Every structure is written in C-alpha cells, then in structure tokens.
Amino acid sequence: MSAIIYGSSQVRLNFGPNHYLLAHLQAATATRFAEGRGFFLTLSGHDDGQETSMSYWLHPSIPLLFAYDTENDEGERPEQIVIEAQHVEALLSAMDRPIGVLWGFDVDADRWVPFYDDPADPDSDK
C-alpha cells in the first residue's frame, strides 16, 4: 500500500499498491515545492456506491508524508522503482492545470488508474 498523509489532521490519501505513481508524484512534488509552489491533487472514485471527487491543495507550508509498504502481499520487498524523467515532467505539467493532478477510478476497466487533464483531448474529462 502506498499513501500520502496530508495536513496536521493527517488525512490519509491511499494509492493502493501503485508505488510507481506515488514515487513519481513524490519526485514532481519535491520539484514543485522547491520552487515554493503548490498544486491541486484531485481524487475521484466510488465511496458507498456514490461517485466522488475531492481536490486537495498541496503546498510546501502544509505537512506532507509519502508512505510506502516495504513488503508486498507475498511478504516480499516490492520491485525497485526507477524514476523516469518523462513521467515526472508529465506530472509537473499537470500541476499547472486548474484541476491539477488527477487520480481516479476507471469504471469501464474496473480499476484505479492515473489520468491527466489534457486540454488538447476533448474526452480527457470523462
């Protein structure tokens, strides 16, 4: 399980087993925070059968913790993640958009997936 622990009330934003996305988000967040800038992180999914969407303002002045499990479901260490510059750049680009970085549930695929608000793609907000 990977998660962001956010704010003084320590809200936990779970990213499931997707260490890859969270590691890249951590790298992009560090870059953004080093510039003294914040961004929105928008989470969408289902809660008690209802579709929900919540946006969190992440900023260097607000406590933030990135948490990763050190064992997978089989009790083994997860695969090492290599940070890829193009994925960090994609997240940094998304951080400049009004809705920020999006993470949501794909009903058709029945799984959680990252997605980005791409103004060039008219279907990106679906």
Image (spheres, helix red, strand yellow):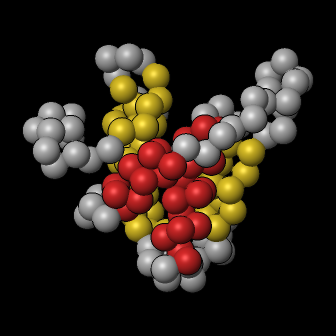
Q: Work out whether residue 103 or residue 27 is closer to the camera in this orientation and state it.
A: 27
Q: Quarter holding the C terminus?
A: top left
Q: How many marks?
A: 0
Residue 32 on image: x %, y %? 49, 70
Q: Quarter holding the N terminus?
A: top right
Q: Residue furthest toward the right?
A: 75
Is residue 78 in view?
yes
Classify residue 50 by image quadrant.
Answer: top left
Q: Is residue 15 left or right of residue 71?
A: left
- Height in image: 30 above or below 76? below
- Height in image: 54 above or below 44? below
Residue at coordinates 53% horizontally, 68% vertically from top-left? 31
Residue at coordinates 32% horizontally, 44% vertically from top-left? 116
Residue at coordinates 84% horizontally, 38% vertically from top-left? 70
Residue 15 on image: x %, y %? 58, 41
Residue 53 on image: x %, y %? 35, 48
Q: Work out whether residue 43 or residue 72 is closer to the camera in this orientation and state it.
A: 72
Q: Work out whether residue 35 or residue 111 is closer to the camera in this orientation and state it.
A: 35
Classify residue 64 by image quadrant.
Answer: bottom right
Q: Is residue 69 left or right of residue 45?
A: right
Residue at coordinates 26% horizontally, 47% vertically from top-left? 117
- Height in image: 6 above or below 33? above
Q: Is residue 21 left or right of residue 78?
A: left
Q: Residue furthest toward the left?
A: 122
Q: Is residue 70 left or right of residue 55?
A: right
Residue 81 on image: x %, y %? 68, 38
Is residue 55 in view?
no
